[in-house]
Image (tube, rainbow, N blue to C red):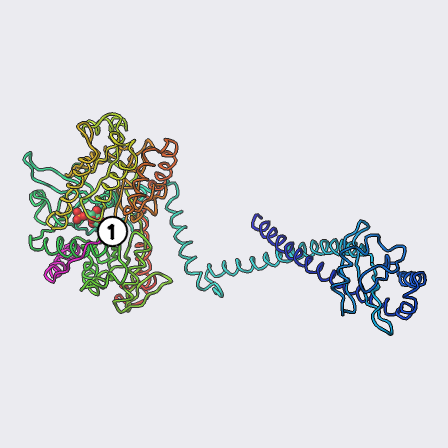
Amino acid sequence: MRRAAGFLLVLLFGLGALALAGYAVLDRTTAAWFERDLQLRSSLAVQSARRSLVRNWSDRSNLTAVLQDITRDERILGAAACSAAGELVAATQGYPQEFPSAALERRLAEGTAGEPSWSTTADLPMGRVHVSATAVAGEVGPLGFVVLVHDLSFVARREATTRDLLLVAFFVLALGAAVVTLLAARVAWRGWTSELRKALSGGPAGSFQPLVRDVRSLAERLARERHSEAGAGVWGADRLRAALKQHLQGERVVILANREPYIHERTKDGIRVQHPASGLVTALEPVMKACSGTWVAHGSGSADRETADAMGRVRVPPGEESYVVRRVWLTEAEENGYYYGFANEGLWPLCHLAHTRPIFRAEDWEHYVRVNRKFADAVCEEVDSDDPIILVQDYHFALAPKMIRERLPRATILTFWHIPWPNAERFGICPWREEIISGLLGSSIVGFHTQQHCNNFIDSVDAYVESRIDRETRAIVQGPRRTLVRPYPISIEWPVHWLEDMPSIAACRALVLADLGLADDVLLGVGIDRLDYTKGIEERLLAVDQLLARWPEFRGRFTFAQLAAPSRTKILRYRELNERVEALAKEINERWGNASWRPIVMLRSHHEPPSVFRHYRAADLCYVSSLHDGMNLVAKEFVAARDDEQGVLVLSQFTGASRDLTEALIVNPYDLQQSSAALAAALRMPATEQRERMQSMRRIVSEFNVYRWAGRMLVDAAELRRRERLSGRLSSPSGATSGESA
Ligand code: F6P
C-alpha cells in the first residue's frame, strides 16, 4: 500500500511538472501568434484605407474621420496619424492619452525608417495593449505613419481559460494513468509471483531461471534454521549439539589445528595447564566442548608427552573431560621448517598487508609438505567412518585437505582460513602457489571471514590453476570435484564461560588499578595482543603519544596498558618488534611521564584468560589497531566482557571485526591524527552514548556467536553430505566424492 502511494505521488509530481512545462511553452507560443495576428490585421486595416489616408493627410478633420473609420473594429482602441518625424497629426477619440509618448516618438523616428510596419506591446492603466505603426506613402514620397492601438486584455482571458482547461485535463489524465498503471503492475506482479511460485515448487523456471537456484537455497536455509530454531532461542552449546545430532546424526567431528587448546607446561611448581593466546583456540574450544570428538594438534608443551597416552591422546578440558586432544610430535627441525619457516615467515606475511616481506625457503617448504602429511595421517587415524566430518584450520595446513581426500575420498572436509587471503597478484609471488591452492581444493568447503577474502581466493584459483569457476554457486569445479567457497565470520562463545565467576566491574577495576599501581581515578585504555607486527602495536603507542601532545587535559590522567604475549620469538622479525615496542613505550613514558604517572604500561608476558577479562572489565577503552587482521576476536571479547554496557571500543578498519562491530569508533591505525582523536572522543564519550553503542555491539556478538558460526558450517556440511549420499546412491560409489550437486 505504501509502495503504491509512493508510486502514485511520483506519477502525480511527474505529470504535474510536465503539465507546467507544457503550459509555459503553450503560453509563449500563443502570445507570439496573437501578436503576429494583430500586426497583420493592423497592416491590412491601414492598407485598405491607404487611398483615403493619402488623400486627406493634410486635412486634419477628414483625416480624423478616416482614422475613426479604421477603428470600427471593436478591438482597436484608437488610431493616430503621425508625421515621419513622429509628431502627432491626427488621432481618434479613443486613442490613449499616453501616445505618442516620448518613447514611441523615438521608436517611430529610429525603428521604422525603411520598414513597412513596427509593433510592440505596452501596459497602460486601461490594461495591456498592442501598438503598431504602419508607414503611409503618397505619390511624392513618405507621409508618415498610422499608429493603431489594439486591446490585448482578451489574450489574458484566453490564457486563463487555457490554463484552467489544461489543469483539469492534467488531473484527469494523471488519475487515469495512475489507475491504469497500478492495475497493470498488479496484474504483472500476480503473474510474476505465480510464475516464481511454480518455478520454486519444481515447475519450469522460465524467465526466473537464474534466480531460482539462489532463492531455493535461501528458502531451504531459512526453513532449516527456523526448524532447528523451534524453541531453541539463540545459538548456544545445546543448540549446536542438537543441530549436530539432527543434521549429522550425532556424528563426531575431527578438528585439525596446529595450536592445541591445552598446553601442559612443566614449571618449578609442577605441571601447569596453559591456555594459549590464540583467536583460533578461543573460537574453536567451545565448539569442541559442545560437539565432542578429537582435536588433532601439535604437542608443543614441555609436559605434553607425559600427560598424554602412547598415541598422544589426552582427554580435556581438565576436570570436565568432553573431548580428546590428539597430540602430534614434531622434531625441532620440522617445527622450525613448517611452523616458524614456511607458515610464519612465508604464508603469514604473504597474507597480511603489513609491509613485512615473506621469506620462502625450499627446505621450509619440504618440511611443510612432510608435516602436513604427518598431520593428515594422524587425522585419518582418528576418524571412525569412511565419510567423517573434518574441520581443517588455518594456513598451517593448506596441503592437508588434498592429502586427507586421497585417503578418505568420501570425507566432508571443511577448511577455514583464519587469516586474510591476499589478492591474486600478491599471492602469485609464492613459489608454491599452485600446490597451496590444489591442496585447499581437496576440501568440500573453504571458508574465510569475509566475502572479500573469498573473492581474492577465487581470483587466485582462476589465475593459477586449471579449473572452472562457477560464480553462481560460488564453487570451484575441477573435473568431478566441486569446492564451495563461503564467508563464515568467526566469533566467540556467548556467554563467555570465563565471565561466570568474574568479580564485578568495580572490583575488577580496583584489582587491575592496584596491580598496575595506578590512581583510582585514572582513565584506563587497554590493548591485548600477541606481540605480532600485524597488530599495529607501534601505531597504537604513537596514537597515545599524539593524544597527549594534542590534548594536555589527558596528561597525568590517562594510562594505556598493553598486554603483549610474546609470540614466535624464534623469528628475528618478532624479536626486533619486541625491542622496537619496548623502546617506543620507554620513549613516550620519558616524554610525558613523571614520578607518579606513566602513560604506557607494557606487560610483556602471557596472560591467562581470567586476567585478560579482568583488564577488559577495568578499562575505559580498548584499542584494537591491527594493520590487517582476518577477524580479531579481542574486539568481540571486550564487548562480551562489558555486561555493564560501558567502555568504548576503538577498532581498526582493517580487521574483519570492523564489518560486524560498526558501533565501535572505526579508525585507520596509520592515521595518527584520526586515531588519537578517536581515543580522545572515547575518553570523553558520555555514559549514555557508550551504553547505546555497547548494547548494539553486544546484541551482534551474542546473536552471531561462535556456535552459530560452527552451526552454519556444519549445517552446510550436512547438506553437502546428504546430496553426496543421494548422488552416491544414483551413481557409482566413486562418483560420491564429487559433491557435484552442492
Ligand atoms: O590468526 C591466525 C592464528 O593462527 C590465529 O588463529 C591465532 O590466534 C594465532 O594465529 C596464533 O598464532 P600461533 O598459533 O602461531 O601462536
Horizontal arrangement in the rendering, residue 117 relative to residue 624 (left or right): right
Label 1 sits on a secondary structure element that is loop
Along the line of sight, the residue nearer the viewer: 356 or 698: 356
What residue did someone put label 1 on? 418
- Image location of residue 528, percent across then percent down: 22, 40
- Residue drawn where x is 38% and y is 44% of the image: 229
Vertical position of residue 374 compared to residue 314: above or below: below
Q: Quadrant of residue 508?
A: top left
Queried whether the magenta region covers residue 363, the answer comes back as yes
Identify residue type, mark 1: His
Identify which residue is drawn at 57% across, 47% down.
Answer: 2
Q: Indicate left or right for 737 with 147 as reference.
A: left
Quadrant of the drawing holding the C terminus: bottom left
The stretch drawn in magenta includes residue 2: no
Magenta span covers which residues? 355-381
- Asked whether mark 1 and ligand 1 are closer than 8 Å, the reply comes as yes
Front-most of residues 341 and 489: 341
Q: Is residue 612 visible?
A: yes
Q: Is residue 237 visible?
A: no
Between residues 124 and 63, which one lies in front from this camera angle? 63
